[in-house]
Every structure is written in structure tokens, then in C-alpha cells.
Amino acid sequence: MSLPTLHIFSKPLSYYHDVFSAGLLAKQDVILLTRDACYDQAAWRALSTNRTCMLNVCALARGISAQNNIEPLSDQQWITLVEQSNKTITW
């Protein structure tokens, strides 16, 4: 099994409509929501069945929590995810 690519997003899904689609995700890739992307977690989750995570500190700063199908990550878990990924792409 190949290592995943970590796709890091910081804005709502609509911001990326001209440059990103679910077709760019491999089956094992992971989506990480940071900053204002946390507000749009339902749209991100609806886009793909890929593992979707959200950085806890970003959600906390915005007064929201992760929905049931979004995996909250601590800073340490985020570091581990980066280390386990083949590459990261920050959109």
C-alpha cells in the first residue's frame, strides 16, 4: 500500500472550485481542514469519502466542534499524520 498524500485546506470548499475536485484524491489520501475550512466541514465531507480531519486548535478558535464524520486532530496527531504521509499539498 502506498503512503497517502495529505491535502491541507484553509478556506471553504467554494474558494477552490476552479482548482480542486475530488478526482484529484487517491483512495488513501487524507483531507485536513484548518483555519476557515473548518466552517465548511459538511461540504468538504460531502465532496469525498476520503478520511477527513480537522485541526482541533482551528475549530476551538472558531467556536465549533468536529461533526461525527470528521476526525479531530491535536497538534501532535497532525505532526504524526504529516510524518506518515508521502507528501503534503497545501492548497
Image (cartoon, rainbow, N blue to C red):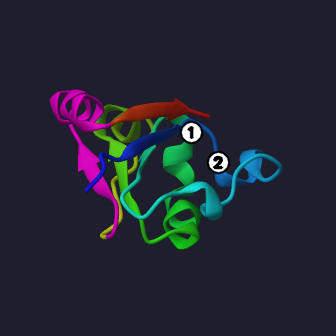
* Residue at numbered disc 2: 12
Most extreme residue toward the front, as rendered?
1
> For the residue labelled by badge 1, is the local secondary structure a helix, a strand or a loop?
helix
Image side of residue 64 versus residue 40, left or right = left
Quadrant position of residue 83: top left
User: Residue 44 or 50: which is nearer the viewer?
Assistant: 50
For image coordinates 49% across by 66% down, the residue present is 45
Quadrant position of residue 82: top left
Quadrant position of residue 46: bottom right
User: Residue 63 or 90: which is nearer the viewer?
Assistant: 90
Q: Which residues are magenta?
A: 69-85
Find the distance from the CA under tag 2 to the CA under tag 1: 6 Å
For image coordinates 31% across by 37% down, the residue present is 85
Is 18 in the magenta? no
The percent coordinates of residue 49 (x first, y second) are 44, 72
Badge 1 local density, few (<14 within 10 Å), some, or many (20+)? some
The percent coordinates of residue 37 (x first, y second) are 55, 44
Type of residue at label 2? Pro
Tag 2–tag 1 contact (CB < 8 Å): yes
Most extreme residue toward the right, as rendered?
18
The percent coordinates of residue 39 (x first, y second) are 54, 50
> For the residue labelled by badge 2, is the local secondary structure a helix, a strand or a loop?
loop
Q: How many marks?
A: 2
Q: Which label's residue is closer to the chain start, 2 or 1?
A: 2
For image coordinates 62% across by 34% down, the residue present is 91
* Residue at numbered disc 1: 36
37 up-or-down from 80: above or below: below
Is 71 in the magenta? yes
Type of residue at label 1? Asp
Image side of residue 8 versus residue 78, left or right = right
Image side of residue 72 versus residue 80, left or right = right
